[in-house]
Amino acid sequence: MNQKYASEKNEFMVISHPAAIAITMGLIRPRIVLSTGLMKLLTDDELTAVMYHEMYHKESRDPLKNFLISLCSSTLWYIPILKWFNQKYRIFKELLADEFAIEKQATSVNLGSALLKMLKVGKQEKIPFVHASFADTSVNYRIEYLLNPFKEFQLKLPVKVACLSLLVFSLICMLFVFVLL
């Protein structure tokens, strides 16, 4: 697989595991991890689509970005717009990775089929480290995109959450200014 698809040495790691797993993990040097269960489940074309999807995550360093955004949204929990941004960012990145895989194969059939097979097999186990996964994020948006790729992804900013976040941020800034005086 590394000889066929990888641009650098050991881009792909295959683990012996019965569950269908396709993730990109690693903050500094991300790697793509695929399981033998996934390889048994998918056809060669479907597996190629999944690999292109994960290659997008690797090239754009999504595990690191996901970690930083998650860290900000969890440590700054009192600014609720960050949680909303974290969710929308993950959806957007999954759609971009799907688009990359579709462009590489010139069809959405393989990616859609792989996604449906992985959903049919069952939900992946929660993995306790930072990663970008093929089938655990924004499934409804992804299926909708596969069925209608010309429909644009809508980002509706929640006005109440944005106003509350702005208010909290303003109060924090005023406290810092008050302490400095």
Image (cartoon, helix red, strand yellow):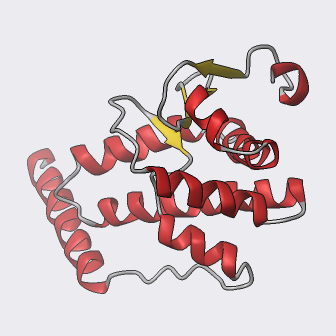
Q: Can the viewer see residue 99?
A: yes
Compared with residue 34, is residue 60 higher up or lower down, i.e. above or below? below
Compared with residue 5, is residue 111 higher up or lower down, i.e. above or below? below
Q: Can the viewer see residue 93?
A: no
Q: Quadrant of residue 15?
A: top right
Q: Is residue 164 left or right of residue 178?
A: right
Compared with residue 154, is residue 41 higher up or lower down, i.e. above or below? above
User: Where is residue 142 drawn, in percent x and y?
Assistant: 58, 68
The residue lying toward the viewer, choosing from 45 and 170, is 45
Could you tell me which residue is drawn at 42 percent across and 40 percent down? 68
User: Where is residue 163 drawn, in percent x and y?
Assistant: 25, 79
The image quadrant where one finds the N terminus is top right
**Labels in figure, total:** 0
Could you tell me which residue is drawn at 15 percent across and 45 percent down? 180
Could you tell me which residue is drawn at 49 percent across and 60 percent down? 89
Q: Quadrant of residue 54?
A: top right
